[in-house]
Image: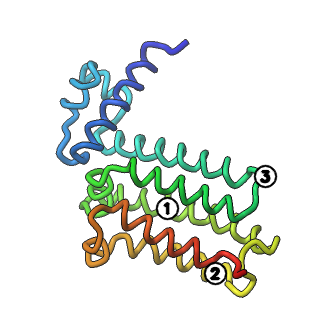
Amino acid sequence: MESIEDQKLREILIAAKELFWKYGFKRVTIEEVSREAKVSKMTFYKHFKNKIDLVKKIYELEVKKGMKKYRSIMDSDIPFVEKVEKSMELKREQTENLSPEFYNDILKGDIDELKKMFNETAQNNIQIILNDYIQAQKKGEIRKDIKPEFILYFMNHMMEMAKDQRLSGIYSTPNEMIMELNNFFFYGVLPRK
């Protein structure tokens, strides 16, 4: 059974995510999160040092949830092509659920701590994905003529491309751009028939 403190923490996280997804986190105050969660500011501060600490926790939870689903796909006993397709579907779902306001506040904002967190998390996840692709390549499920270092370079470059104002300006939402980058990457590494 959930303790009262755990329940209050859960309510803060739910309320903050709803507000951050709607308005981005820069425009939302701790007072608004506390009011929406029906907790006092004192209760908020029992769980979080500040709003940035809350943003980091929400982002961490979202990433963990996504990586758990990704791991489930990659550990399943299906052909690699299907794993790629399911990974693409997962990425599509995640990008549709990702708030452009929240994403922009992190990547295009002026809070270096959050940019650093985002980049470190992205690099860790890229390394996990790269390791999966190296294993798939060893099994002949990915073209042998592509160097794993190129895969890593391209994944890193995709992260930089996502920050490019000119590129993001081509798309109506960040989600659309992320899916385009992923489609280009994934379908470029599959074996040729």
- Residue depicted at 25% across the width and 72% down the height: 169
- Between 65 and 33, the one lying in front of the other is 65
Residue 104 found in image quarter: bottom left
- Between 156 and 167, the one lying in front of the other is 167
Task: Determine the secondary structure under disc 3.
Answer: loop
Residue 13: x and y in percent read: 37, 32
Residue 30 found in image quarter: top left
- The numbered dot on residue 67 is none
- The numbered dot on residue 77 is 3
User: Of callouts 1 and 2, which one flags the residue occurring earlier in the amino acid sequence?
Assistant: 1
- Amino acid residing under circle 1: Ala
- Amino acid residing under circle 3: Asp
- Residue depicted at 59% across the width and 57% down the height: 87
What residue is shown with label 2? Answer: 149
Colour approach in the figure: rainbow
Task: Determine the secondary structure under disc 1.
Answer: helix
Taking the view exactly as shown, the residue that stands out farthest to the front is 193
